[in-house]
């Protein structure tokens, strides 16, 4: 395989005389690939059934002549104004049910059947016109599906009613699932169902959860229809998508359906200007996109500058590109080529400025292109086979969004805590869906899996019974598949596997629960207790808000909350495997300690040892890739001497990495 780098280009924004100038600059930068076609449906079809592709034929021909491959986006969002006129059901309706004008992009309900009729017709026409073009490299499945707004239209309400009929069959079954006898909310027919948000309130947790599932399925099913349209009309041509499944106020359950539409996993990557939790969350998102596809990632969009930030410190974006190559990436397409003169992103700064002259971002991408040209001769794209899996559950995040008082730790923050363990140890992992676990793993981590449906419980049970080792963290198994709290011992449906009962929980910010000699953090007005974990004379502190009271039934205590006479980590041998339960919200410190112990016990593959701030991977035999994420020089000890592929220098025992620099060391 090769590595690909390029940009997102919007030729419809610029005069035809400029196109060749831009393409020449792309060639000079060493770009191999360009993404075209997104966000401009009405430039191809300005009126219903009237197509004007001739201008774009010229663009495609120019890129073919230049030898630059085109990822052609099937642009169905934003919908043209004429679509909104013909399809009132695709208009976003506010919580009062009133139709809203499409003032900005992504103001369409893609689940509307009338909208889909026009969108998929356009997709067929576009795909058939360009599927055999010599410039075509692949297709993009629309732009950022999942971003946008919920529509509270009567059209959506009727679809929601039908969705519920299909799921539950009878109104009695729906009443049981939604616990409608509580607070006198009993429904007498599906016609009584309304969307679970209005101008003054949101619905009960069970009903609101089903509404989120309904919106998720609508977007996900449309994504599948688009994939099928592309594949049926252009079989064998690769495709990807920069969908936005993780959008918290809309989005969709990606892991539920990814194997029904993904060819090459893809996303847009915007880590920002700091190495903070936003950066770590971006890492999690692309690990989720990779899932168990066993294919490299295509970044159909990749940060250039930022909104309101012209450029970043020298080497910073190149460093991010190198980090993504280290984490199974094959394609990087910068967003955007030339900074837009108008519209919603007119000050999101690109590779070229408003005046069309290259910025420092351009030269940084040019350097990255030269680096990728060298690296593709070695073990890239890098595709490891991890022996560790982290379970991700979109529905648990939805539960936390509704019940913020109970679940103070955001689901995304819990996943970040787990990710940091392996980010700092340079170990590989896969993010997996326990409804559809495909591969074998030595260690499975289940962090804050608040909602556990029967199939997930069965997956965990079978995994441990067959000899696997699982770590589950606090809050897990609190609610069932309907969103109601379990009426059986928690973790729900898994109490026997872990050999425990969660008997209660405590908050570290309640002074009455503080131990006499505990360490207190924060201010006098807002203080909380740091919990001390102890095992066999070894102790350390963790900083959490929430911890649990475990009743050990058939499990044993593996570690204690010192001074509290409570179990902090339990262990149970179940079948041929072992189940650990951490009686606190997901926390990096205690997880790192337990994973470090289990790395030796289970023979997990260890990461490359590096100084703080240096990421590293063994890419292939005798090939080690190092990246300095710090803003200063860092010295790295080498186990074996070797040649630096990027610097073209030879190194003996030490590699000095400049700020944000990278190097591939190849030994004989």
Image (spheres, rainbow, N blue to C red):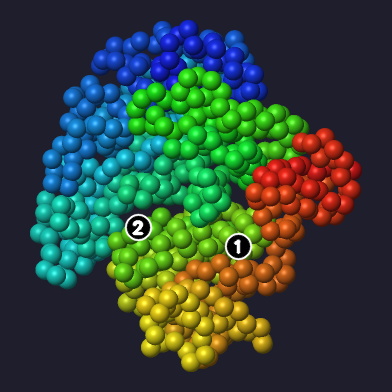
Residue sitting at x 76%, y 42%:
664
- x%, y% of residue 146? 37, 41
The residue singled out by tag 2 in the image is 398
Mark 1 burial class by Cα count in 10 Å: few <14, some 14-19, many 20+: many
Relative to 219, 238 lies left or right: right
Q: 462 left or right of 117? A: right
Q: Nearer the viewer, residue 221 or 592?
A: 592
Q: Is residue 145 left or right of residue 516?
A: left
Q: Nearer the viewer, residue 56 or 517?
A: 517
Name the image quarter holding residue 365.
top right
Q: Quadrant of residue 453?
A: bottom left
Q: Which mark is residue 421?
A: 1
Number of numbered labels in the structure image: 2
Residue at the spot 27% in from the left edge and 35% down from the top edge:
107
Quadrant of the frame with the N terminus: top right
Q: At which x and y percent is residue 270?
A: 49, 42
């Amino acid at each position: 395989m090769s590595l690909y780098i390029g940009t997102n280009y919007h030729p419809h924004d610029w005069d035809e005389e400029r196109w060749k100038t831009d393409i020449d600059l792309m060639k000079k930068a060493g770009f191999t690939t360009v993404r075209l076609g997104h966000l401009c449906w009405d430039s191809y079809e300005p009126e219903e059934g009237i197509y004007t592709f001739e201008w774009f034929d010229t663009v495609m021909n120019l890129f073919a002549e230049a030898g630059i491959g085109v990822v052609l986006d099937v642009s169905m969002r934003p919908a043209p104004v004429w679509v909104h006129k013909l399809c009132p059901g695709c208009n976003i309706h506010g919580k009062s049910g009133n139709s809203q004008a499409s003032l900005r992009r992504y103001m369409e309900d893609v689940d509307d059947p009338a909208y889909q009729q026009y969108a998929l017709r356009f997709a067929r026409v576009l795909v058939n016109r360009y599927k055999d073009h010599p410039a075509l490299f692949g297709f993009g499945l629309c732009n950022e599906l999942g971003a946008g707004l919920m529509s509270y239209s009567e059209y959506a309400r009727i679809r929601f009613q039908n969705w519920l009929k299909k799921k539950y069959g009878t109104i009695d079954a729906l009443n049981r699932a939604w616990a409608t006898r509580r607070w006198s909310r009993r429904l007498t027919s599906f016609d009584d169902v309304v969307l679970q948000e209005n101008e003054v309130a949101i619905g009960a947790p069970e009903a609101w959860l089903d509404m989120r599932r309904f919106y998720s399925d609508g977007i996900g099913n449309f994504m599948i229809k688009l994939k099928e349209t592309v594949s049926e009309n252009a079989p064998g041509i690769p495709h990807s998508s920069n969908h936005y499944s993780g959008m918290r106020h809309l989005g969709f359950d990606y892991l539920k359906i990814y194997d029904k539409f993904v060819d090459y996993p893809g996303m847009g990557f915007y880590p920002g200007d700091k190495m903070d939790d936003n950066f770590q969350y971006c890492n999690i998102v692309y690990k989720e996109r990779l899932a168990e596809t066993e294919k490299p990632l295509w970044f159909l969009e990749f940060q250039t500058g930022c909104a309101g930030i012209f450029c970043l410190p020298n080497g910073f974006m190149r460093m991010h590109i190198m980090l993504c190559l280290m984490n199974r990436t094959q394609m990087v397409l910068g967003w955007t080529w030339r900074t837009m003169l108008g519209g919603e992103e007119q000050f999101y700064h690109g590779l070229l400025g408003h005046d069309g002259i290259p910025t420092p971002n351009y030269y940084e991408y040019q350097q990255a292109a030269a680096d990728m040209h060298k690296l593709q001769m070695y073990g890239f794209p890098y595709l490891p086979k991890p022996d560790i899996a982290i379970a991700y559950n979109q529905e648990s995040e939805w539960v936390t969004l509704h019940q913020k008082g109970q679940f103070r730790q955001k689901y995304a923050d819990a996943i970040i805590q787990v990710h940091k363990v392996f980010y700092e140890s340079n170990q590989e992992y896969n993010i997996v869906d326990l409804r559809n676990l495909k591969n074998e793993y030595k260690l499975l981590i289940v962090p804050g899996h608040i909602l556990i449906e029967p199939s997930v419980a069965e997956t965990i049970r079978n995994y441990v019974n067959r000899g696997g080792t699982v770590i589950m963290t606090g809050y897990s198994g609190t609610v069932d598949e309907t969103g109601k709290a379990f009426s059986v011992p928690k973790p729900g449906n898994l109490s026997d596997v872990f050999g425990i009962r969660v008997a209660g929980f405590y908050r570290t910010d309640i002074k009455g629960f503080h131990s006499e000699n505990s360490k207190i953090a924060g201010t006098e007005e807002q203080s909380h207790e740091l919990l001390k974990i102890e095992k066999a004379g070894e102790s350390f502190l963790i900083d959490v808000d929430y911890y649990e009271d475990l009743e050990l039934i058939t499990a044993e205590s593996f570690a204690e909350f010192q001074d509290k006479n409570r179990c902090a980590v339990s262990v149970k041998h179940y079948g041929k495997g072992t189940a650990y339960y951490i009686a606190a919200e997901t926390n990096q410190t205690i997880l790192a300690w337990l994973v470090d112990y289990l790395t030796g016990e289970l023979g997990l593959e260890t990461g490359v040892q590096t100084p703080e701030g240096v990421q590293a991977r063994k890419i292939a035999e005798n090939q080690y890739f190092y990246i300095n994420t710090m803003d200063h020089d860092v010295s790295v000890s080498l186990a074996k001497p070797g040649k630096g592929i990027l610097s073209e220098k030879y190194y003996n025992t030490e590699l000095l990495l400049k700020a944000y620099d990278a190097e591939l060391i190849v030994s004989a």
